[in-house]
Amino acid sequence: MKKCRICIAVIMVALFAAIAFCESKIEDPYKIKSTYIISFIKYLEWERKDVLPDDRSPIIIGIYSKKNEDSDQYLFLFKQYAALINENAAIQKKLTKNHPLEIKRFVSLEEVTAPCHILFLPSLKTPPEQDKTTGDVLNELKKKLDGYPTLLVGDAEGFAETMGGHIHFVLVKGRIEFIVNLEALKQSGIQVRYSLIENAYNPNKEKKE
C-alpha cells in the first residue's frame, strides 16, 4: 500500500482542487509548501497555556524573508488560504479548532516577535541579513523568540538535520517531502501527532532499503 501524503480533503477542495498530495508530483512548489504548512496545524499541540490563551486566539504564521518575488508569492498564498479558512466555519473547526489564522511577514530580525506559532524561512538566497548563513539566522531567531514554542520550518539544505530547525522541505524524486527533527521538537514545547511523523520522509530508512 502506498504511503499517503498528509492531506485534508476539505482544504484541498477549498484551496486548489487540482492538486492532490497522494498521487501528483509537484506542479507549484509555492502552493505545495504553503499548503503543507497550513496543514501541519492540525497535527500540533502547544504545551504552554499562554500560547493560545482562549478559543479564539489567532494562530500566527510568519514568513521570514526580504521582500522579493518568492516571499511575495508565499505571502499572497498564505493570506489567500487564511482568508478562506477564516470565512469557513467547518474548515476552521477541522483544521484549527476554531482559531483564526493570521499571517505576518518579517523582513528583519528586529521585526520578529512572539507570539508566532509557525515561522517559515523560505530558501534564504537573499536573507534579510546578507552576510549571514541560514544557520546563523536560525540561531539568532531562536534567541529573539526567547524560548517561545514556535515551529521553525525551512527548505535550506540541512535545515532540520544540522541547523536545528523543526521541519525541513526536501525534493525527493520530483516530489516535495518533509523531514521532521524529533529531537528539536521535544525541546520546543510543541507536541506533534504520530500521523505527522509517520508521513514524514526518513532518509535513513531509504538508505537501509
Image (spheres, grey):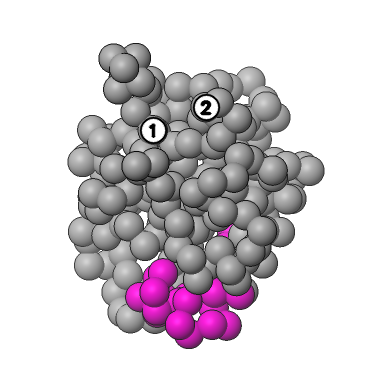
Image quadrant holding the C terminus, namely: top left
Residue 112 appearing in the image: no
Three-letter code, disc 1: Tyr
Q: Residue at x 60, y 71 (%)?
A: 14
Q: Nearer the viewer, residue 2 or 17?
A: 2
Q: Return the mark for residue 172.
A: 2
31 up-or-down from 93: above or below = above
90 up-or-down from 161: above or below = below
Residue 208 appearing in the image: yes
Q: Residue at x 29, y 74 (%)?
A: 53
Q: Which residues are magenta?
A: 84-113
194 relative to 155 in the view: left or right? left
Membership of 72 in magenta stretch: no
Residue 162, percent from left and from top: 38, 20
Q: Residue at x 45, y 57 (%)?
A: 7
Q: Residue at x 32, y 48 (%)?
A: 196
129 up-or-down from 19: above or below = above
Label 2 with label 1: CB-CB less than 8 Å: yes
Give how far apart the Cα atoms at labels 2 and 1 are.
9 Å
Residue 1, percent from left and from top: 34, 42
- Which residue is label 1 attached to? 201
Residue 38, percent from left and from top: 49, 58
Give the secondary structure at mark 1.
Answer: loop
Three-letter code, disc 2: Val
Residue 69, percent from left and from top: 78, 43
